Amino acid sequence: MRYNAIMTVASILSTLVFLFMPAQTTLYSSDLTPVVTLPAGYFCILSDGEEKAGYTAVMYDDLIGYVKSDAVTAVDYTPVNKYETNVQFRCDNDGQPVNLRSAPRKSAGIITVLPATATGHSYGAVNGDVLMTGGGDVWYYVRYDGVRGYCYYAHISVDPTPPNVIEKEPDEVFDEPTSTPPAEDETQGLPRYAAILLIVALCIPVPIIMFYLFRKPKER
């Protein structure tokens, strides 16, 4: 059963087409609205989404969307490090909670309010509204407690994105499982050598018994 499961996973992986992103690449929604800028040097996976001219349907970690077709290159291997999943954000708003919004706009609905001590994963940034006078227009697309949304850059701090170490996963070699034979006669209760000794011990008295039963009495 375990062997079959491993072979199934290996088969699925072998059919995936990984797309390399040599530069920062924008991930778009199904209506081609920018969602987030993905980091350079990482990979997305070709998916079977609806075809759009000039765009390719992809998956990146737990995100689904589109990238411009000329921004990615297909590779014929499975990379070890596919996505960036370790970059963390922390609320940094002078001890105040932070709004998580549905879009990088000040008019967008508030999905939830993050506690002042909240931390989570940051996928990357995207341009949006300027939320404060003299501020920038950068918003981070983040995940907190399973919920995704946008936080204004001035209200959180984000770890730098590490460069990807591009390595090919080694080819897996799966051997057919072989059954291990049980130890000699152990499944019968006794090892073979012990069984032989027992049989010999039981058989030794037989000639003696036969001798006394059938021997002729001495004539007087």
Image (cartoon, helix red, strand yellow):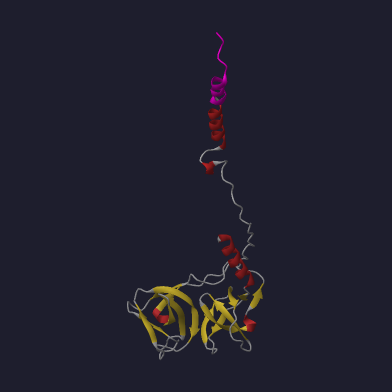
**Residue 3 appears left or right of 125:** right
**Residue 3 appears left or right of 154:** right
The quarter in which the C terminus is drawn is top right
Name the residue at the front extreme: 220
Please name the residue shown 59% across and 51% down the image.
179
The quarter in which the N terminus is drawn is bottom right
Vertical placement of residue 71 versus 175, above or below:
below
Number of numbered discs visible in the structure rendering:
0
Near-viewer residue (136 or 76): 76
- List x then y, in percent, for residue 68: 61, 84
The magenta span reads 205-220
Asked whether residue 209 is drawn in magenta, I would say yes
Near-viewer residue (37 or 218): 218
Near-viewer residue (29 or 213): 213
Vertical placement of residue 161 versus 195, above or below:
below
Residue 5, image quadrant? bottom right
- List x then y, in percent, for residue 37: 53, 81
